Image (cartoon, coloured by chain):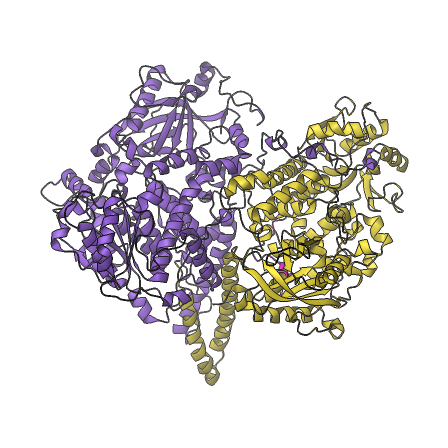
Amino acid sequence: MARAVFSSPNAAAAANILVNFAVLHIATWSRKSQFNSALMCFRTAAASRESLKMEPLAVTLLPGEERVIDKDIMYICPFSGPVKGKVFITNYRLYFKSDPSVTLNVPLGAIGRVEKMGGASSRGENSYGLDITCKDMRNLRFALKQEGHSRRDIFDILFRYAFPLSHGLLLFAYLSQEKYEENGWSVYKPMEEFRRQGLPTDKWRITFINDNYELCDTYPTILVVPFKATEEDLRKVSTFRSRGRIPVLSWIHRENQAVICRCSQPLVGMSGKRNKDDERYLEVIREANGTAKLTIYDARPSVNAVANKATGGGYEGDDTYQNAELVFLDIHNIHVMRESLKKLKDIVYPNVEESHWLSSLESTHWLEHIKLVLSGAIQVADKISGGNSVVVHCSDGWDRTAQLTSLAMLMLDSHYRTLRGFQVLLEKEWISFGHKFASRIGHGDKNHADQDRSPIFVQFIDCVWQMTKQFPTAFEFNERLLMTILDHLFSCRFGTFLYNCESARDTNEVRSKTVSLWSLVNSDSTSYLNPFYTPESSRVLYPVASMRHLELWVTYYIRWNPRIRQQQQSPVEQRYMELLALRDEYLKKLEELQLTDSSPNSSHLSNSSASNAASPTQHINHLHTPF
Amino acid sequence: MLSSLGSAGGKSAKPSFVSYVTPEEIKSEKEPSRKEKHPDLLPGEVVFCSASTVLKYTQDDLSQRGVFGVLLCTNFRVSFVSDEAPTEEMVRTLFKNKLYGENDIPLSCVDNIYGDKRKLITGGLVKNKYPSKMIIHCKDLRVFQFSLSFSKEEDAKKIFQGIVHHCLEPKSLRCLFAFSYCENTSYPGSYSYCREHLRKKQTVMFDSVEDWTQDMKRTKGNCRVVSENSNFELSPKLPQYFIVPKNVSDEDLTKYQGKGLPMWCWSHHSGCALFKTASIPLVQEDNVCCRMLTAVAHNHLYSVKTEDLSDTLPTVQDILLSYNRFKQFFLIDNTTEFWMSDMKWFSSLDNCGWLDIIRQCLQKAVEVVESLEKENTNVLIMEEGGSDLCCVVSSLVQLMLDPYYRTLLGFQSLVQKEWVAGGHAFLDRSNHLHLKDKVESQSPVFLLFLECVWQLQQQHGPAFQFSETYLTVLSDSIHVPVFTTFLFNNDGHRDSLLRAESPHTQRSPLNCPTVWDWSVQFDCKAQDLFTNPLYTEKPKQDTSVRKSYRPRHLRQLSLPSSAFKTPPKKGFFKDEADNLKKILGVKRLSRWMLSPSSDSPQTSSSVREFYEAWQTKPLDYHGLLLPCLDGPSIRVWMQRYLRWIHDVQILGGGPVAMLSKVSEILGEVQELQRQLDRHGCTLTSNHKGARPRAKTAAAVIAARSSVRLSSSFPFVTSRNWSFKPAIPTSLLQSLMVTGMAGNLADREDDGGPESLV
């Protein structure tokens, strides 16, 4: 049997992922390219007439995608050595094809850095060319001929189109003409989501005080706050919270009414300032469900929290916040996480570190950070299940806070474990509450060394993946969805992850001018479903945050390495799908048999019984299992 | 119910086992249960001593909780019988071992005993004292903690000394429970029946000429079955029957007690074969080694590669040392320590080297596979003794090349062939007898093999008919001193002892069960968990394949280089022989001595190429199987090692959550098949509602899925279900900040002055 990809009913989705895979080997090339075009046609049925077919490019362009340049080039493949071929650059992607062995298909958005390598005088083979660092855990090197200025045009064009915002150009999301059956922008409606949670209640109300982003420019317009807090109170509290990010409700437990509130750090400063309104406000949150003590989770290590006092921030002191307990969760900041992932890349790309792999892995601390984030979220979820309300913050409340609240909500609320629900969770906790995607990812921005960049969201998706690994039946979506999300986190093909906050998205008319990633996903939702999903609505999911159970997400971080067997479908999944198909087939046959049995028409009967008698045994051969 | 001692404090409390309850309080509570309790004894089992009012700590909790009961020591086990009436759920434990329960420790399963302040107790040193607390680490990785301070002094002293004596001090083989068990059980009768059954279509025992002949025929081997040793005349260390190359002379058979004899393991379809041998004695006048190599080479195309495993793989002592360090990570008697060690888990794992040893064995096996499969040369592996790493490597090679050995019966036959008949010194390696002079020879070599099999299995799940649970149970069974499989050093040893111990000296030797008789330990339902729901038998269109059990090699790897074969030059080997002999005489080579491409490139890179070439082909679960040896691919056998550790149990999750769904649907499909079949024959009479009922494993698991499973399934049931998540207790400043480049950790998230606000 051929590899699962091509025989699976989800071939289109499989190909979708394949599109982004770097190295496709000879044997499967032709089939894959067919799939690519099939896929594109399928996706863009409405707009297909607009799509340009580039000769001899094998990939069909997206609607709105335009070719910019093509050139003969040498790709220095780290796995199979230098290969000659042709590179095509469009306003969306870099596409390389060598006949017939290697294909690269890289969205320009995934490019973090483009550098010239070698000079006109440098010697040695393939020493003159381009070195491209990608945000998705790989590097690409191309070698060019030294004569002429062959490198300059391609470098300039790549630089221009990979970093459009630095050159006064539009992100591809604004150029894309893609059309989908589903409109992903309608996935998240804040009022609907709050209503689903049972809000408002007699203790919690919905406020439109931030309608014009006046209270807090990085918060969404619709907020849920304690019923007892007046608009005036909110304004006063906002002066004491970093960037005005006041504590607001993220999630409420239906039975015990315990809530998860999120905010930024209090502006305590060196002098240890107090703010009666803020203290009173937290007291009101505590009172809302009669919690004896409100737990404040400060995501930072305590030293960092203390250090923040020097810059005007700080944490809630025991003496000032009477009925609150403060717990530090020891999660490090964005800079530590950035360096950690960088180290991880060093040991997995291009080759997996051979000697002392485990020690090397440990020295990156990547899984250790994952562990800390997960165990922080477990503590939040545990408190909530116990009926205690919690407030979560870090410094600004848009990185670690988003990780903690969204993971805790994933543990507590099975709705977020569905395909749609997960989209809502991301839209709500990450996108609407102002995780600074633009700064953290650096969409279209050439400044690769920007200190604001950090893989916080990647880390969160990794945590989700760890949970799906530990609970393989609890999530409606599959790994493919997580990979797709991460691919388009960088690609700039969809508007979903663009900009830092809602107000910026409004200004840039993201919803009207770009397509949502969820349009792509929900128009083909079957490819993102986990066949093992078993809904269990009331169950709280506690993953085990021990290094014993955490594992490196090999299929994401090491996916460019051809030695890592990329199984489009796990053998377990494959077997399960086969059995499901077999069951349906048998059921149908049985039904037919019973129909023909009861029908007295003998001519019909003899016909079908003959054929039916033969086929089951045929299948039994395939299914001589131990049971 | 649990008796709580002192504050049922939170997890943050430092563990201290000071008891807060005075014995008087206990007495008043426990006085009524005066009656002598003991477990249901097995045939031949005798209680040596016992003590009541022993507190067994519930190990999954630091809150000083425990259960009172009676602690006993019998000739089979250390057993704790709780004073509490067993709860209903306890009674219907799903995966129950018939020989011993969850509070029983077979004597040979005891690994180490610790006293107060975690002092290691060694046999012989116990005088009149006894510790107030006793911790028992088991070889199946369970940990028991007993407090003796509430028992009567006399009783406590007696039970402690009894346990130490019977678990740690030297004893004779005859004292092992197997002998009294087998004498006192009605088993022999049923056994002989089973044996007959086994003969026909079950595990091949390799204790007869027919078994060997058949296996050689199956692989189309062309060697000579030797039966001269049927009464162990040649050597008690040699198998009763074995196979050697055709060209081995009668004279050579009798020399050196079998040392240097190339023993046939398996024949490749190309005609070349794998042989193993105990290293040839160095001092010799005649050219025995040369003749042996010639004999092997003559088997096929005059080519042979030899590999001395003693030089390239870790020694049995290395294996023991590494494993001893490794197992400590899982013998948890203190949750705080467990979480403390969590941060350094990967490097600790790396440093103990266990995974690396597994990798080396697999790599060596792949090298041998490459020679057989790609180069079609005969391979002779050797080591001192020839029955440790030779067994590991030869069994792994056969698992990779021959899908028959990946079936349950095939696997059991493989263990019989390579390990039991092959003369692996199970008794010495496990040192059940605690003999001082055997301490050196102790080593978990067989477990190492099972570890390697597990790696293959978790990489290529659907290729194996047996499950992970099967391997785990098999690894536990090594320490249950009932099965002949693991009690002896070789065929001769077994034969002489069983004969001597027979109650009817005149007649047949004592009949003891083998481990393959799983019904001794588990009922049928439990045994259903031994099969892997992902496994499908090869479609049987090709009858010729089925007959010979020969793997179909059409789909096997066919590399361009496989066309290259050593040209059958008649004199090839002869010319080399002198040279070879010289080399052999001087020292054993750690690399291939004779390879067609004289100077073979670095083996690891060649193995890598071999793997990559194989990997690009479509995967055939009934064909050649190679393991990926990259860092992330070699992993810890979670089920075996983490099953008893409460804090890392994934409640309601783990791979079993998925597998049970597969089993469920498999059950449905089989049911439908049955209905269809029935319809096929009863087409005229229309019995719509008639549904044949059959118990399948699928149904069993499906029934269980109403109960929440955990990652420790089936070893731990959901009885201790708690909804409290395990929160790492030591989330203190991880050590990583130290040495972190510069002051990244101290910096504000968003640099820049604006963050000052």
Q: Is residue B34 visible?
A: no
Q: Is residue B511 above or below residue B102?
A: below
* Residue A529 highlighted magenta (yes or no): yes
Q: Is residue B670 visible?
A: yes
Residue B161 % position (x, y): 31, 21
Residue A56 % position (x, y): 66, 73
**Residue numbers of the magenta segment:** A525-542
Q: Colour of chain A?
A: yellow
Q: What residue sits 51% from the left and 69% below the top?
A: A585
Q: Is residue B108 above or below residue A559?
A: above
Q: Quadrant of residue A155?
A: bottom right
Instruction: Give the camera-side residue of A324 and B42.
Output: A324
Residue B708 % position (x, y): 52, 45
Q: Is residue B175 above or below residue A610?
A: above
Q: What residue sits 82% from the left and 59% below the top?
A: A169
Left or right, residue A482 beside residue B195: right
Q: Quadrant of residue A371?
A: top right
- Looking at this view, name the residue that lies furthest to the left: B506
Instruction: Give the camera-side residue of A342 and B433.
Output: A342
Left or right, residue A299 beside residue B411: right
Q: Colour of chain B?
A: purple
Magenta-drawn stretch, dominant element (helix, strand or loop): loop
The C terminus of chain A - image quarter: bottom left
Left or right, residue A530 beside residue B399: right
* Residue A439 highlighted magenta (yes or no): no
Q: Quadrant of residue B305?
A: bottom left
Residue A3 % position (x, y): 51, 65
- Looking at this view, name the residue that lies furthest to the front: A121
Q: Is residue A583 above or below residue A317?
A: below
Left or right, residue A401 beside residue A616: right
